[in-house]
Image (tube, grey):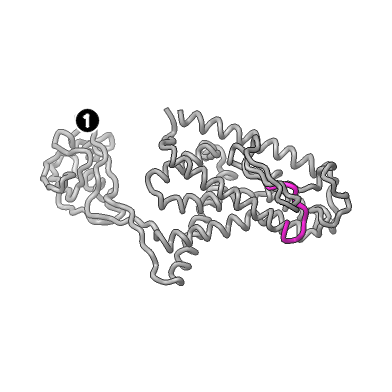
C-alpha cells in the first residue's frame, strides 16, 4: 500500500539520484567559488553525508574534496569555527573577518547558482527537446467503466473514445470532458446514441439510457479523460528559445513560490504533500522511466525549489544567515554575540534534521 508513487527500475533511480546530486553539487559550488574567488579560506568541499568514499587534497592546496556515501546533501566547510584549523583568529581571509557584503555574496551564491542552473537546464530543454504541450484529438477517452453499469451493459469498454453523445459531436479541445458530462447529465431516462471508437480505430454506435443519480441528473457509469497526447515544439530562433525559456522559468517559479506560500498559510492542508529526498528520488525515477525529456523539468523544478527554500529566513538555511547579516547591518556593523548566533543556528539545524528524518521515514513507508 502507498500514496501512488514507487521506485521501479534501477537505472531510473540512478538517473534521479544523479540529477539530485548534480543539483546539490551546483549549490555547493556556488558557495565554494564565491569564497575562493574572493580569496576566502575553505577547508572542505563535500558532496553527500555519512562515511567518506573518496577524500583528496590536491598538491599545494588546502581544500579537502570529499564524496560521501549518501548523495543527498553537501556542504562547504570554513575554518572560522575550528580552533584546530591552523589559521589565526585575526586572519583577514577568514570568512567571518571579511566585510559584510563579501560574506553576503558567499552565503547567497548557492541560491544564485541554482537559479542560473535552472534557467540553463530549461534553455537546454527548449533548444533540444522543445517545450512540452498537450495536443488534443477529437473525442474523450473512457479509462474506466463501472462493472454492471449502464455503459458496460450497452457495450462501452475501457479504452474507448466517445466521438459523439446524442446530437453533440465531441471536439478536439481541453474542455470536452465537462461538455460530455453535461450532455449525459441533461438526459436522464432518455435514450442517447454514443458513437464510440474502439482501440482498433473501428467505430460503433451504442444506445444508452442514463439513469437518474441522487441529484436527478443522468449517469451511465463511466469515467472520462481528455483525448490528448504530449508533443514537443522547438522555437526556430535564439530569440524564440530565450523567450520560451524565460516564460517557462517564470511559470515554474510562480508554482514553487505558490507552494511555499501554501505551507505558511495552510500548513494543515498541505503537510501530507511535503516531500523528502526519498519521495523526490521516487518521483524523479518515475519521470526518467516514462519520459526522459521530463528530467529537464524535474531538474529545473528541484533547482528552483532548493533556491527558494534556502532563501527562507530560517536558522541553518542560507536565508537565516542572510537575516543575521541584515541584523548586523541594522546594528551599524555590530555582530550579535557569537554564542547567540551559534545557538540559533544549532537549534535550527537540529529542527531541520528532525524534519528531514521524519520525511524520509514517511516517504519510505509510502513506498512499501
- For the point 64% across and 41% down, the residue is 54
Residue 5 visible? The answer is no
Q: Nearer the viewer, residue 91 or 257?
A: 91
- For the point 58% across and 57% down, the residue is 115
Magenta span has 110?
no
Q: Position of residue 335 (x, y in %)?
A: 84, 52
Q: Is residue 85 left or right of residue 56?
A: right
Residue that badge 1 annotates: 147
How packed is label 1: few (under 14 Cα within 10 Å), some, or many (20 or more)? few
Q: Position of residue 7 (x, y in %)?
A: 44, 36
Q: Is residue 56 left or right of residue 173?
A: right
Q: Nearer the viewer, residue 165 or 28?
A: 28
Q: How many marks?
A: 1
Q: Position of residue 138 (x, y in %)?
A: 22, 54
Q: Nearer the viewer, residue 221 or 36?
A: 36
Q: Nearer the viewer, residue 64 or 304?
A: 64
Q: Position of residue 144 (x, y in %)?
A: 26, 37
Q: Is residue 195 left or right of residue 21?
A: left
Where the N terminus falls, by quadrant?
top left
Where the C terminus falls, by quadrant?
top left
SS for callout 1: loop
**Hey, which residue is sitting farthest front in the picture?**
59
Q: What's the magenta bit mostly, secondary-structure-wise?
A: loop
Magenta part of the protein: which range?
A: 36-45
In the displayed structure, would residue 130 be above or below residue 264? Answer: below
- For the point 13% across and 36% down, the residue is 154
Residue 228 visible? The answer is yes
Amino acid at each position: 500500500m502507498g500514496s501512488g508513487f514507487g521506485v521501479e527500475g534501477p537505472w531510473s533511480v540512478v538517473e534521479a539520484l544523479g540529477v539530485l546530486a548534480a543539483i546539490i553539487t551546483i549549490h555547493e559550488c556556488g558557495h565554494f567559488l564565491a569564497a575562493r574567488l574572493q580569496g576566502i579560506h575553505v577547508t572542505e568541499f563535500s558532496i553527500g553525508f555519512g562515511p567518506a568514499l573518496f577524500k583528496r587534497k590536491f598538491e599545494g592546496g588546502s581544500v579537502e574534496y570529499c564524496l560521501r556515501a549518501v548523495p543527498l546533501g553537501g556542504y562547504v566547510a570554513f575554518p572560522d569555527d575550528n580552533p584546530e584549523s591552523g589559521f589565526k583568529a585575526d586572519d583577514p581571509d577568514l570568512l567571518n573577518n571579511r566585510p559584510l557584503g563579501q560574506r553576503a555574496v558567499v552565503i547567497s551564491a548557492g541560491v544564485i547558482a541554482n537559479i542560473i542552473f535552472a534557467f540553463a537546464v530549461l534553455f537546454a530543454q527548449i533548444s533540444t527537446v522543445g517545450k512540452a504541450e498537450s495536443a488534443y484529438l477529437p473525442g474523450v477517452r473512457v479509462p474506466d467503466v463501472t462493472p454492471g453499469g449502464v455503459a458496460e451493459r450497452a457495450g462501452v469498454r475501457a479504452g474507448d473514445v466517445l466521438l459523439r453523445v446524442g446530437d453533440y459531436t465531441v471536439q478536439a479541445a481541453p474542455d470536452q470532458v465537462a461538455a460530455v458530462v453535461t450532455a449525459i447529465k441533461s438526459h436522464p431516462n432518455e435514450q442517447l446514441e454514443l458513437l464510440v471508437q474502439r482501440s482498433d480505430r473501428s467505430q460503433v454506435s451504442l444506445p444508452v439510457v442514463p439513469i437518474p443519480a441522487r441529484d436527478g441528473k443522468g449517469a451511465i457509469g463511466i469515467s472520462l479523460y481528455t483525448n490528448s497526447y504530449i508533443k514537443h515544439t522547438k522555437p526556430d530562433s535564439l530569440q524564440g528559445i530565450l523567450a520560451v525559456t524565460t516564460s517557462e522559468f517564470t511559470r515554474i517559479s510562480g508554482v514553487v513560490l505558490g507552494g511555499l506560500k501554501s505551507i505558511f498559510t495552510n500548513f494543515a492542508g498541505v503537510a501530507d504533500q511535503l516531500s523528502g529526498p526519498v519521495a523526490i528520488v521516487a518521483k524523479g525515477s518515475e519521470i526518467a522511466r516514462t519520459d526522459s525529456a521530463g528530467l529537464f523539468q524535474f531538474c529545473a523544478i528541484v533547482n528552483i525549489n532548493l533556491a527558494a527554500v534556502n532563501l527562507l529566513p530560517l536558522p541553518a538555511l542560507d536565508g537565516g544567515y542572510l537575516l543575521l547579516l541584515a541584523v548586523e547591518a541594522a546594528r551599524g556593523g555590530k555582530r550579535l554575540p557569537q554564542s547567540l548566533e551559534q545557538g540559533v543556528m544549532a537549534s535550527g539545524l537540529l529542527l531541520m534534521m528532525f524534519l528531514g528524518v521524519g520525511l524520509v521515514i514517511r516517504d519510505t513507508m509510502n513506498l512499501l
